[in-house]
C-alpha cells in the first residue's frame, strides 16, 4: 500500500481514520498507519515530539493484539516476531535492513539494552549511530556526529582491484611471518652463543 504524501496527509488526519481510539494507543497508531497516514501527520495529531516511542508502542501492540496480523497486514509484516534472536540476525536487521533497536527489541522480545549488547558482540557497524535507508534500498549506518548523503552512490571496487589489494595484504602477512621466524632463529643462536 502506498503511503499518502505530506500534502494528502494534511487533509486525511489520523482522527478521521480512528476517531474513538486514544491518540497514543497502539490500535490508533496501527489504524492510522494501515490507512496510509504519514508519521508527520500522526505526530501533529498526538502532540508527540518524536515518532520513535510511538513506533515502539505500535510494534508492541501489533505483537500482542489478537488478530493484528489479519487486521493490519502491512504494519504487522514490519514487526513480525523473530524466532531466534542471535547477534547475527540482529546485525542483519539493523545494518542491512535499517531497523532501529526499539523495533528489533519488540520483534525479539528482548530489552533494547540486550539487543544493543548482542549487536555489538556480533560485530555490528555502529551500536550508537543512526540508521538511514535510501530510496534505492541502500542502508547507511552512521556513528554519532557523522553526516550522511543518501543520493551519492557507494563506490564500487572492481574485482581486479580487490584481488590486487588482497594479494598485497597476503604478501605483507607472509613477510611479517618470515621476519618473526628469522628474529626467533637469531634469538636462539644468540642464546646458544652466550652459553658457549
Image (cartoon, rainbow, N blue to C red):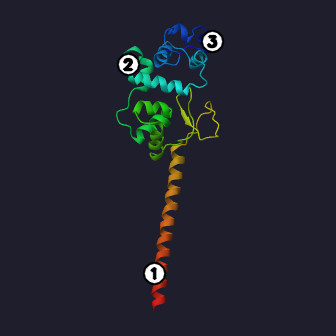
- The image shows a total of numbered marks equal to 3
Location of residue 148 with respect to 20 vertically, above or below:
below
Q: Residue at x 37, y 15 (%)?
A: 70
The tag on residue 7 is 3
The first of marks 3 and 2 along the sequence is 3
Q: Which sits in the foreground, 121 or 19? A: 19
Q: Which sits in the foreground, 7 or 170? A: 7
How far is the residue under mark 1 from the one under mark 3? 79 Å
Of badges 2 and 1, nearer the viewer stands: 2
Residue ranking furthest to the bottom: 196
Q: Residue at x 53, y 52 (%)?
A: 165
Q: Residues within 10 Å of mark 3 (few under 14, many from 20)?
A: few
The first of marks 2 and 1 along the sequence is 2
Q: Which sits in the foreground, 5 or 27? A: 27
Q: Residues within 10 Å of mark 2 (few under 14, many from 20)?
A: some
Q: SS for tag 1?
A: helix
| Residue that carries the numbered disc 1 in the rendered image | 188
How far is the residue under mark 2 from the one under mark 1? 71 Å
Quarter of the figure with the C terminus: bottom left
Amino acid at each position: 500500500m502506498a503511503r499518502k504524501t505530506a500534502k494528502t496527509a494534511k487533509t486525511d488526519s489520523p482522527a478521521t481514520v480512528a476517531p474513538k481510539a486514544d491518540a497514543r494507543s497502539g490500535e490508533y497508531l496501527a489504524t492510522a498507519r494501515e490507512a496510509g497516514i504519514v508519521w508527520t501527520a500522526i505526530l501533529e495529531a498526538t502532540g508527540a515530539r518524536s515518532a520513535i516511542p510511538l513506533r515502539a508502542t505500535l510494534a508492541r501492540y501489533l505483537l500482542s493484539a489478537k488478530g493484528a496480523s489479519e487486521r493490519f497486514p502491512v504494519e504487522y509484516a514490519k514487526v513480525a516476531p523473530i524466532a531466534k534472536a542471535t547477534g547475527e540476525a540482529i546485525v542483519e536487521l539493523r545494518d542491512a535492513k535499517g531497523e532501529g533497536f526499539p523495533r528489533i527489541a519488540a520483534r525479539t522480545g528482548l530489552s533494547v539494552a540486550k539487543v544493543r549488547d548482542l549487536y555489538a558482540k556480533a560485530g555490528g557497524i555502529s551500536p550508537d549511530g543512526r540508521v538511514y535507508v535510501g530510496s534505492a534500498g541502500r542502508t547507511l549506518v552512521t556513528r554519532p556526529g557523522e553526516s550522511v548523503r543518501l543520493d551519492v552512490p557507494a563506490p564500487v571496487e572492481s574485482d581486479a582491484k580487490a584481488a590486487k589489494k588482497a594479494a598485497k595484504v597476503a604478501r605483507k602477512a607472509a613477510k611479517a611471518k618470515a621476519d618473526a621466524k628469522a628474529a626467533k632463529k637469531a634469538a636462539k643462536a644468540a642464546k646458544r652463543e652466550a652459553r658457549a
